């Protein structure tokens, strides 16, 4: 499932579309390539510049809502990769790092970041299996409940 049109076709088959790449809120790029790897900046659950899931887990934000937000972060990350090198150049997902704004005592960060991991598995199959960290933090930019960053291996050509 790694031929040149697989990932774009797979997104369409899943009835998913990539959003426009979010405008950086600081002095950084949405994604950079070095060698065979593309690293994304942290992706928030943004739609048209608006954060869709705000607050903290364990203090009013549900695991289910935050997992949906992690899915949106994933689509935003894929959009950044697509704009930089093209989605169909992805060979595999290497690493996912998820940050979850967590209230005192909240410890279900892995279940939240499963939203990102599960979507990557839906899209990329075994090429979507990755190493991962799910980290609880006190605050995230824009009061977002979730932020996710990615590392992808890409081919030299499609």
Image (spheres, rainbow, N blue to C red):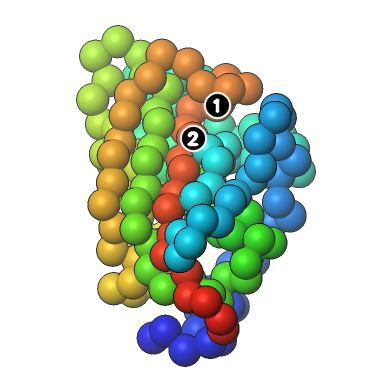
Query: Which quarter of the rendered picture does the C terminus lie within?
Result: bottom right
Crowding near pointer 1: few (<14 within 10 Å), some, many (20+)?
many
Direction front: furthest residue:
35
Question: Can you say whether 48 is above or below 123 in the image?
Answer: above
Left or right of 23? Residue 28 is left
Residue that mark 2 sits on? 147
Q: Nearer the viewer, residue 69 or 78?
A: 78
Crowding near pointer 2: few (<14 within 10 Å), some, many (20+)?
many
Left or right of 103? Residue 107 is left
Query: Which quarter of the rendered picture does the N terminus lie within?
Result: bottom left
Mark 1 to mark 2: distance in Å? 7 Å
Callout 1: SS: loop
Q: Position of residue 125 (x, y in %)?
A: 34, 74
Callout 2: SS: strand
Residue at screen point 42% across, 22% down: 101
Question: Can you say whether 37 is above or below 57 in the image?
Answer: below
Q: Is residue 60 visible?
A: no
Residue at screen point 29% across, 73% down: 126
Question: Can you say whether 16 is above or below 72 in the image?
Answer: below
Label disc, if present, on residue 152 of the rendered structure: none
Residue that mark 1 sits on? 144
Q: Position of residue 131 (x, y in %)?
A: 26, 52
Left or right of 28? Residue 44 is left
Residue at screen point 47% across, 16% down: 139
Q: Position of residue 100 (x, y in %)?
A: 39, 28
Marks 2 and 1: in contact by CB < 8 Å? yes
Q: Is residue 156 visible?
A: yes
Question: Can you say whether 102 is above or below 73 in the image?
Answer: above
């Amino acid at each position: 499932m790694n031929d040149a049109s697989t990932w774009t076709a797979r997104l369409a088959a899943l009835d998913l579309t990539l959003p426009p790449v979010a405008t950086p809120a600081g002095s950084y790029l949405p994604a950079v390539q070095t060698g065979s790897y593309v690293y994304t900046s942290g992706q928030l659950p943004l739609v048209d510049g608006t954060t869709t899931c705000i607050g903290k887990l364990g203090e009013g934000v549900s695991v289910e809502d935050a997992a949906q937000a992690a899915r949106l972060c994933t689509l935003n990350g894929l959009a950044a990769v697509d704009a930089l090198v093209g989605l169909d150049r992805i060979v595999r997902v290497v690493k996912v790092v998820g940050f979850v704004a967590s209230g005192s005592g909240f410890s279900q960060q892995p279940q939240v970041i499963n939203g990102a991991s599960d979507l990557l598995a839906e899209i990329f199959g075994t090429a979507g299996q990755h190493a991962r960290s799910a980290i609880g933090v006190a605050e995230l930019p824009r009061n977002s409940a979730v932020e996710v960053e990615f590392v992808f291996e890409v081919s030299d050509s499609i």
